[in-house]
Amino acid sequence: MAILERIKQDIEIDFSDIIDEIEISEINEMRIILKDETFIDVWFSLKLPGRYAYHWD
């Protein structure tokens, strides 16, 4: 989970003008809530290093 916290910090710094909130769940998933009320879900695999998926809604 430490890597998710680092990614969260980077996102908050680089995209603070469009980010409202970032949530990290226990299942290696991050939800980035944008100021326009859309969100981005990012999932990171625990079994396969470097594998991830994302969805913007």
Image: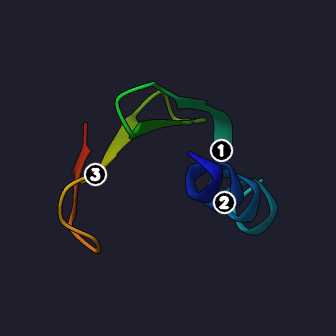
Residue pointed to by mark 1: 19
Closer to the chain start, of discs 1 and 3, is 1
Q: In the image, is 19 to the left or to the right of 17? A: left
Q: In the image, is 41 to the left or to the right of 55? A: right
Q: Is disc 3 placed on a helix, strand or loop?
A: loop
Residue pointed to by mark 2: 11
Closer to the chain start, of discs 2 and 3, is 2
Which image quarter is the N terminus in? top right
Q: Is disc 2 placed on a helix, strand or loop?
A: helix
Q: Crowding near pointer 3: few (<14 within 10 Å), some, many (20+)?
A: few
Q: Nearer the viewer, residue 24 or 39?
A: 24
Q: In the image, is 24 to the left or to the right of 43? A: right
Q: Is disc 1 placed on a helix, strand or loop?
A: strand
Which image quarter is the C terminus in? top left
Q: In the image, is 39 to the left or to the right of 3? A: left
Tell me the residue at 28%/51% (across/down). 46
Colouring used for the render: rainbow
Give the Cα separation between the discs numbered 2 and 1.
8 Å
Give, as a three-letter code, the residue at label 1.
Answer: Ile
- With respect to residue 6, does 5 lie above or below? above
